[in-house]
Amino acid sequence: MTLAHTLSLTSTFVHALLRQAPLDHVQQLLTWAAACPAHHPARPRHLEAWLMAGARQQWTTPPTWVKPLASAMPYRALSDAESQATPIRTEPRVDPDWPTVERFLNSGDPRTAEFLHEVAQRLTDKMGPELARRACATAGPFWRAMCCEVWRQRYTAFEATG
């Protein structure tokens, strides 16, 4: 068994494996263990324990490293010039309804107070009173998101008349 020698296993251990499982199954386990890439995240930390468990439990399904996982997105290395040409976007994406909501809030419409009260009430229900007060006071991203949510549900009529 050259695989046992490659994996630095003692003959005593290999004989113990053969007492647990037939020769062809032990050879399959050793083949799987030898096929594991050096830095694979699922690499067994204690190879002998892994092999003994496989022999005792009669594992028939190959481990994840036998078949490479198919990646949904191909990767390629970028040169420094390419990576600097496409800067990483750090600002949050603006909701497409936000300009309309902002125009409604600045319009002086009498329904604005009712709208802001409903936004504050929903934030309180979701986040609790203290966080809702902070969100309303800072007019931050949670407040804007809730404004857009309330807008989509109740106030789309302004868009046609505004």
Image: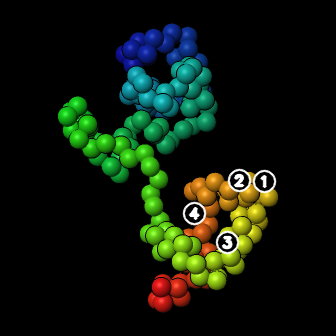
Residue of label 4? 144
Tell me whether circle 2 and circle 1 mark residues in contact (CB < 8 Å).
yes
Q: Residue at x 68, y 56 (%)?
A: 137
Q: Residue at x 20, y 34 (%)?
A: 81
Tell me whether circle 3 and circle 1 mark residues in contact (CB < 8 Å).
no
Residue of label 3? 116
Q: Amino acid at mark 4?
A: Arg
In 3D space, how far apart are the residues under numbered discs 4 and 3 (Cα atoms)? 11 Å
Q: Earlier in the sequence, mark 4 or mark 3?
A: 3
Residue of label 1? 130
User: How many other residues sit within 10 Å of disc 4, few (<14), some (14-19) or many (≥20)?
Assistant: many
Q: Amino acid at mark 1?
A: Glu
Q: Is residue 75 left or right of residue 150?
A: left
Q: Secondary structure at mark 4?
A: helix
Q: Is residue 50 left or right of residue 132?
A: left
- Figure quadrant of residue 115: bottom right
* Residue 117 image point, x, y percent: 72, 72
